[in-house]
Image (tube, grey):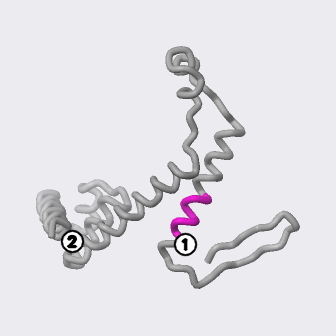
Amino acid sequence: MITYFFADGTRSNVTNLPQQTEKLVENLTRLEENLERKERYHTVSLDSQEYEGLDFASHEPNALEILETTETAMERKMLVQKALVVLNEKQKRRIIMRFFDGLTLAEIAKREDVSLSTLHESVTGALKKMKRALEK
């Protein structure tokens, strides 16, 4: 669900959007807010301004660059989801903890009560499976 806030104080909720579209709108909104925040606290490196000129020192991505970056991220996410399908539940859980939740191998091994070498073999095997799935 996406909520739009209007200048007169009213709200409008949009539902029944495809999840991919909803995520794209959320990412663009987040990027727009970050750009606005940067504009409020606009700083330019004096070194980069002196050596590269003001245009290069203060480059802010435009809407097209943001959209292309977001689309590329969505494509990568879809590829990863496609590759995750080939894994068993244990491997999938470990890959998600490692690469999406940002846990170290030692932390995952401790949570799952397995040795570090066993976990390393499992994650390495899962990555190889994912790579083969994407090469097909």
Magenta segment: does it hold 23? Answer: yes
Which residue does the numbered mark 1 point to in the structure image? 22
The quadrant of the rendering that contains the N terminus is: bottom right
- Residue type at the position of mark 2: Gln
Which residue sits at x=72%, y=39%? 40
Q: Nearer the viewer, mark 1 or mark 2?
A: 1
Which residue sits at x=88%, y=67%? 8
Q: Residue furthest right?
A: 8
x and y percentages locating residue 122 in the rendered image: 15, 65
Vertical position of residue 41 compared to residue 19: above or below: above
Which residue sits at x=64%, y=73%? 2
Earlier along the polypeptide chain: callout 1 or callout 2? 1
Vertical position of residue 88 compared to residue 30: above or below: below
Residue 122 visible within the image? no
- Residue type at the position of mark 1: Glu
The quadrant of the rendering that contains the C terminus is: bottom left
Magenta segment: does it hold 95? Answer: no
- Graded by Cα atoms within 10 Å as few (under 14), some (14 to 19) or many (20 or more), the crowding at tag 2 reads many
Q: Which residues are magenta?
A: 22-29
x and y percentages locating residue 95 in the rendered image: 26, 65
Which residue does the numbered mark 2 point to in the structure image? 91
Vertical position of residue 135 compared to residue 50: above or below: below
Give the image quarter of residue 77. bottom left
x and y percentages locating residue 82 in the rendered image: 28, 73
Residues under labels 1 and 2: Cα distance? Answer: 29 Å
